[in-house]
Amino acid sequence: MAIDIWFPLAIYYEDIENSADHKNSMLDKIYSLKSKVVTKRTNDQSSWTGDVHDIDQLHSDADFSWLTTEVKKHATNYLKTLGLDLGKIDIYAQRSWPIIAEKGQSVSRHTHPNANLSVVYYVSVGSGADSGATRFFNVNKYNELSGSLSSSMTEAYCDFNTLNFEQVDYAPKEGRIVIFPSKQPHDVTANKCDDPRVSISYDLVITAKKQTDDGTPEFLMPSPDRWVKL
Ligand SMILES: [Fe+2]
């Protein structure tokens, strides 16, 4: 018997070696930025996210430059692994923001339709209880034979494996960076620890190189330096 497995979702992760050296300074900076926000735009059940509070340009902040450098390195590794020709493209950090999940807080299911690849870095994670997880949903379900078979009302499956999983959880870990396609639906489950879970997200965009001998390929996003604001 043989089974070939095709079209897998690729989630990248790596533990950054010197991350502990930056933890306290990053936390101080994040809480300092948060303290300047006057109007809270998230409810008590939802994590506090910088992107809806106009704190979404950490990649332009010198205090986070070491992390932005790491994001570039690991995003490059990810794209190489996916088979992209890095000689043809540039990677831009478009948006980056802190997230603070107090006990009981979560992030509802979403995608990042404004970007191509998304990054999460865990600055601080509580211990002693479930600190929540980034949960990716299997939207393609290539092996779903029918909706009724996979329904929780049917319970037709007894062996859960990579051929039938409907979701997968990535537990947070301090100093870990995770990268995934921005269009992949995901949420973040509730932090049950007494200590907050603090992370930083980056949204990255892929464009053509600034200058090419042959012009920009038809379907590749032109470099922003060729754009004109109208
Ligand atoms: Fe997200």
Image (tube, grey):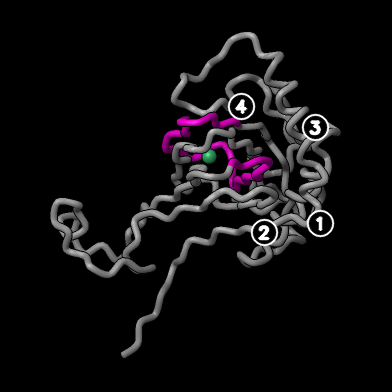
Q: What residue type is labelled 3?
A: Ser
Q: Mark 2 vs mark 3: give the one in front.
A: 2
Describe residue 88's horizontal placement relative to residue 136 as left or right.
right
Residue found 50% across the figure and 46% down from its top: 134
Q: Does the residue labelled 4 lie within 8 Å of ligand 1?
A: no
Q: In which quarter of the image is the N terminus?
A: bottom left
130 and 143: which is toward the camera: 130
Label 1 to label 3: alpha-carbon separation: 30 Å
Q: Is residue 20 left or right of residue 104?
A: right
Residue 219 appears at what percent x and percent y? 59, 50
Front residue of 20/160: it is 20
Q: Which amino acid lies under the numbered mark 2 shown in the image of this protein?
A: Glu
Sequence-first tag of 4 and 1: 4
* Residue 46 against residue 125 in the figure, above or below: above
Q: What residue type is labelled 1?
A: Asp
Disc 2 target residue = 14
The residue tagged 4 is 51
> Which callout, 4 or 1, points to the residue nearer the camera?
4
Describe residue 48's horizontal placement relative to residue 29 as left or right: left
Q: Do the residues labelled 2 and 3 touch (CB within 8 Å)?
A: no
Mark 3: which secondary structure? helix
- Report if residue 118 lies within the magenta region: yes
Q: Do the residues labelled 1 and 3 touch (CB within 8 Å)?
A: no
> Sequence-wise, which precedes: disc 2 or disc 3?
2
Q: Using a 10 Å C-alpha cutoff, classify the residue at mark 3 as few (fewer than 14 neighbours), some (14 to 19) or many (20 or more).
A: some
From this viewpoint, which residue is outermost toward the top?
38
Mark number displayed over residue 60: 3
